[in-house]
Image (cartoon, grey):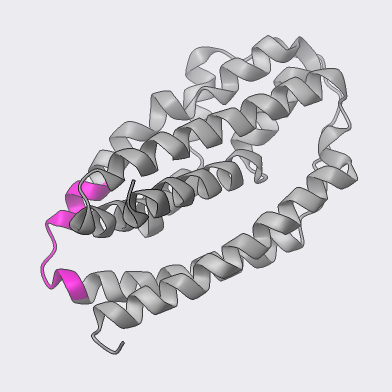
Amino acid sequence: MNDVLWGSFGAGAVFGVIGGISPGPLLVLIISESMRHGAHAGIMVAMTPLLTDLPILILAVFLLNQLSHFEILLGCISIKDSIFLRRLGWLSLRTAGILLEDEKLEPHSFLARKMTNYLNPSMYLFWFTFGAPFLVSSTLDNPGSAIFFIFSFYISIVGAKILIALGVARSSRLTEGVWYLRIMKFLGIFLMGFALLFIKDGLGYFGLI
């Protein structure tokens, strides 16, 4: 496996884990379902990205491919993404635990789980600002890199959410504990590193390095 494929696989894995454990509507739903109805209910919510992301991914890639001045566009996106990733990294470093009120509710329906993710701005923000541009630019170097990125991303994001569901089902204080905070801070450092790489890529697209 060459460096491009390994890079795509690694990027997908890192961003999948970050997406899997970062606070957001879907994670809150996973935690609440696991606390109130057990691990199975939480796992069902954790599988939601597999059912909702594909149309958004395809749309983002399609729109990006329709644009002209492709190299300059990718350069601008890379610089913008470096700022976006640095902000995400900073937020990860400052993450606090997730607290939920204890309410007795019925498990959420399949439609409710899908709508939670479709109404989640993080999904659109990721695919339109980072995911799709990364797929397109890496595919220029190796067409197989997109498959590696998507595979590792979804294995990681769903796997991370399933682990949280299992952990919360055993201990409802998992996401308030020190290990969750340490992992988020560790991933925040990774995001800062990716931000630097994107600055380098952006300057490369502009022909400056």
What x and y, as percent, mark residue 204?
29, 80
Quadrant including the C terminus: bottom left
What x and y, as percent, mark residue 190?
61, 61
Could one spot residue 121 in this view of the protein?
A: no
Q: Quadrant of residue 128?
A: bottom left
Q: Quadrant of residue 51?
A: top left
Q: Quadrant of residue 171?
A: top right
Check if residue 68 falls in the magenta segment. Answer: yes
Q: Is residue 187 above or below residue 53?
A: below
Between 101 and 3, the one nearer to me in the picture: 3
Check if residue 166 falls in the magenta segment. Answer: no
Q: Residue at x 21, y 77 (%)?
A: 72
Residue numbers of the magenta segment: 60-71
Q: Residue at x 86, y 26 (%)?
A: 172
Q: Residue at x 44, y 53 (%)?
A: 125
Q: Residue furthest front?
A: 1
Is 20 placed left or right of 64 in the picture?
right
Q: Is residue 194 above or below residue 158?
A: below
Quadrant including the N terminus: top left
Q: Residue at x 85, y 19 (%)?
A: 170
